[in-house]
Each structure stands twice: as structure tokens, then as C-alpha cells.
């Protein structure tokens, strides 16, 4: 069975459930300054990787992105057979339902603020 997941560490609870959000496929990849991954998505936006599953638009930290991953599992055992990154989805705050992609989780230099 295949199922899609949104991967983000901008919330302690992790990413939202994937419910047919738009996926922007990755069209290009580059590494700046020897260690900063940048991914171009098909709307000509560069998505910058700040840390493990922490992605923002290259020119602003206000647009937060989640990596969409498809996980295939064996129906009988539940064992993961394979995974594939499909692209990125733009994450939106939903204050009415308590979904906030908190700026405190954007600080990779302070281990106390990185969600586990």
C-alpha cells in the first residue's frame, strides 16, 4: 500500500495529514556555500533547507514548506518497502484548529527548540 505524508519539523506534532494538498514537484537542486540545499519547484520558487525537514522559501522565512513523501508498505507485514520524495507543499497556519508553524522551531542553533 502507498500513502503520502507531509514531513516537517516546524511543529512539535510534525506535519499535517496529507489530504490532497498541492504538491510542487522538484525541478532542480543545488548546494550553496558547500552545505545549504536548495530545491527549485515548478513555480520557479527556490525552497531552502534549514535543517532536517525544515524548509522555507529562499528569500523569506515566512513561507514554510513541507516535504511530501510517499511511503510504500507491505500489506501483510506493514514493513516499509520504499519511500520517494514527491516534492513540496506550502504549509498554512490554521489558527482556528490550533495549527501554527511556530517560528521558535526555525532556530537550528538551539537544540532545546528543535522538536523531536
Image (spheres, helix red, strand yellow):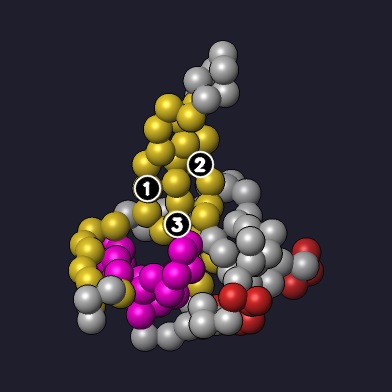
Return the disc, 1 or 3, that comes first in the chain's sequence.
Answer: 3
Image mark for residue 56: none
Query: As drawn, is 4 to the left or to the right of 33?
Result: right
Q: Which residue: 62% across, 49% down?
A: 17
Do tag 2 and tag 1 residues touch (Cβ < 8 Å)?
yes
Query: x%, y% of residue 63?
Result: 49, 77
Q: Residues within 10 Å of mark 1 (few under 14, many from 20)?
A: some
* Residue corresponding to mark 1: 86
Find the magenta span and give its range.
37-58
Q: Which of 109 and 70 is in front in this view?
A: 109
> Is the residue 72 above or below the residue 101 in the image?
above
| Residue at the spot of label 3 | 67
Residue 51 falls inside the magenta stretch: yes
Earlier along the polypeptide chain: callout 2 or callout 1? 2
Q: Which residue is drawn at 52% across and 35% down?
A: 3
Residue drawn at 53 percent across, 52 percent down:
6
Residue on which disc 2 sits: 4
Relative image position of residue 102 (x, y in whole percent): 65, 77
Dominant SS type (magenta): strand
**Which quadrant would residue 29 be assigned to in this image?**
bottom left
Q: How far apart are marks 3 and 2 (CA)?
A: 10 Å
First reached walking from the N terminus: tag 3 or tag 2:
2
At horizontal 28% and vertical 62% (from top left) the residue drawn is 42
In the picture, measured across the screen, residue 85 lies left or right of residue 34, that is: right
Q: Is residue 103 above or below residue 92?
A: below
Horizontal and vertical percent position of residue 98? 77, 67
Amino acid at each position: 500500500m502507498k500513502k503520502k505524508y507531509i514531513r516537517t519539523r516546524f511543529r512539535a506534532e510534525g506535519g499535517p495529514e496529507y489530504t490532497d494538498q498541492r504538491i510542487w514537484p522538484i525541478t532542480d537542486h543545488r548546494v550553496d556555500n558547500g552545505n545549504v540545499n536548495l530545491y527549485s519547484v515548478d513555480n520557479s520558487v527556490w525552497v531552502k533547507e534549514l535543517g532536517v525537514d525544515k524548509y522555507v522559501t529562499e528569500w523569506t522565512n515566512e513561507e514554510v514548506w513541507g516535504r511530501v513523501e510517499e511511503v510504500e508498505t507491505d500489506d501483510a507485514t506493514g514493513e516499509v518497502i520504499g519511500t520517494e520524495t514527491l516534492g513540496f507543499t506550502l504549509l498554512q497556519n490554521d489558527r482556528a484548529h490550533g495549527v501554527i508553524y511556530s517560528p521558535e522551531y526555525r532556530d537550528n542553533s538551539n537544540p532545546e527548540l528543535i522538536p523531536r
